[in-house]
Amino acid sequence: ELQACVDKIELIDYHQTISVANGLKFHALNAGHVLGAAMFLLEMGGRTVLYTGDYSMEDDRHLMAAEIPNVKPDVLMVESTYGVQVHASRAERESRFTGTVERVVSRGGGWLVPVFA
């Protein structure tokens, strides 16, 4: 059963447009959230919908900011875990993170960074 599911996966790249049944097309764009995160611009019947989960408009050391489509969508759908939360600046977050790592490692400790999306 697992292999049957895997066989149905179709990989697409950012900026690639896929056409499916009944004139529905979707175009993948970088969402800037985590590596590989995408937002999708859907087109059908002359209407456009931009759908995205979490996204970031801030360049990071390992990610570029989310892309802005070259068309204004008729509908914007956004799912967001921290949609109304204000985060500390990148400089503050990096300083706090590297300071903590330095304190742990300088005492002979190890450091494991769990990552989730």
Image (tube, rainbow, N blue to C red):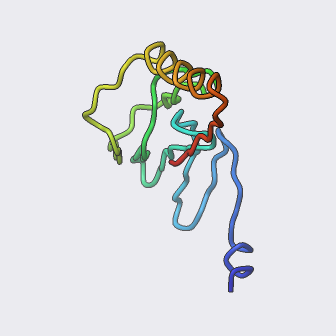
Q: Where residue 13 appears, x then y in whole percent?
A: 70, 45
- The residue sitting at the front extreme is 107
Image quarter of residue 92: top left
Q: Residue at x 32, y 39 (%)?
A: 82
Residue 113 in picture, x, y percent from top left? 59, 40
Residue 25 picture location, percent across and down:
55, 53
Q: Residue furthest left?
A: 84
Counting from the top left corner in percent of width and height, residue 66 is at: 51, 30
Residue located at (61% from left, 57% from top):
19
Q: Is residue 65 above or below residue 25?
A: above
Residue 76, image quadrant: top left
Name above or below for residue 67 compared with residue 6. Answer: above
From the viewer's perspective, tell me whether residue 86 is left or right of residue 56. left
Q: How many marks?
A: 0
Determine whether 4 is above or below 12 in the image: below
Q: Which image quarter holds the N terminus?
A: bottom right
Q: Is 90 on the left or on the right of 103, as rendered?
A: left
Q: Residue at x 48, y 13 (%)?
A: 91
Identify whether 7 is placed above or below 73: below
Q: Is residue 48 visible?
A: no
In this view of the protein, can residue 45 be seen by the observer? yes
Looking at the image, which is closer to me, 13 or 46? 13
Residue 8 vs residue 89, the one in the foreground: 89
Residue at x 55%, y 51% (from the top left corner): 26
